[in-house]
Amino acid sequence: MEPATDSRARSSRHGIFKVRDVSLTLPSNGEDRLILDSIDLDVREGEIIGIVGPSGTGKTTLLRLLAGLVHPTSGTVSFNERRVEGPSDDAVLVFQDYTAALLPWRTVARNVALPLERRVGKTERAIRVAKALAAVGLGDRAGEYPWRLSGGMQQRVQIARALVMSPRVILMDEPFGALDAITKAALHDQILDLQAATGATIVFITHDVDEAVYLSDRVMVIHGTPGRIVHELVTDLPRPRDQIRTRDDARFHAVRHELGTVLRDGH
């Protein structure tokens, strides 16, 4: 459990991602389109960063840059002082559409085991899968099939598949967007518990202002076309967080107000 006043301890942690003056152009309708422009971002070890902004501002593209799935047209993206050249086992991506990400003909356990196949032996694979499923509260669902599970459970399977790799960074693209409010709140707390237990760095995209404030240590606002980071907001909320107590905190309301104002005004 982290102390209530941990902002200084978090700010002193070393950088894990460094994005420097990154711009990215992609082809669109027969011509090049500038998606992101002049992006500078530092992600520190063990923190949770939320990325918010209107649709079409390049949020998912920024996440894909961190994951090594696309490369900048100019500027650099580095991970632990080394240039990102492609995907890494140290940084895994959790997609928004869990129904498309999971293989319906595989059991829950075999879906989670997928990244380990041809990498580790059967015994170690079984141990790591069981541990990952237990961490997301699905230890008793290993033999089920994804299509028999609720949306929240399916998303937890996807998170377990990320955890099985023991990543240093988990990148999440609107992971809770399709879930109902009660399921979403439960998964928020589960993510916070997992992060506290593993020390993983988390970067996630959301359109939900309350979600961004509740989960994040820092929130980055992307705005415009092309997208630029126009604002950085430190939440400075105490941990552990609680769905009622944290949301009643005056600091929560102040941060939420500031974030809403920036999103409305675009700066």
Image (cartoon, grey):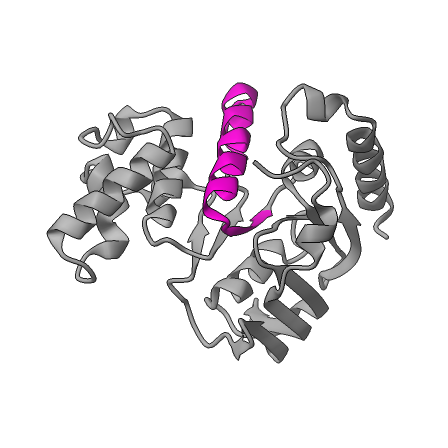
The quarter of the picture where the N terminus appears is: top right
Q: Residue 205 magenta-drawn?
A: no
Q: Is residue 135 above or below residue 41?
A: above
Q: Which x, y percent locates residue 194?
A: 47, 39
Q: Is residue 111 above or below residue 166?
A: above
Taking the image as shown, residue 234 lies to the left or right of residue 123, namely: right
Residue shown at 56% from the left, 22% from the top: 181
Taking the image as shown, residue 44 lies to the left or right of residue 209, namely: left
Residue shown at 63% from the left, 38% from the top: 215
Q: Which residues are magenta?
A: 176-204
Q: Quadrant of residue 214?
A: top right
Say if residue 104 shows up in the picture.
Answer: no
Q: Residue 194 magenta-drawn?
A: yes
In the image, 248 versus 52, the foreground residue is 248
Say if residue 65 shows up in the picture.
Answer: yes
Q: How many marks?
A: 0
Q: Which x, y percent locates residue 17?
A: 58, 66
Taking the image as shown, residue 255 lies to the left or right of residue 170, namely: right
Chief SS of the magenta region: helix
Q: Is residue 264 above or below residue 46?
A: above
Q: Which x, y percent locates residue 120?
A: 18, 59
Residue shown at 42% from the left, 62% from the top: 90
In the image, 64 versus 5, the foreground residue is 5
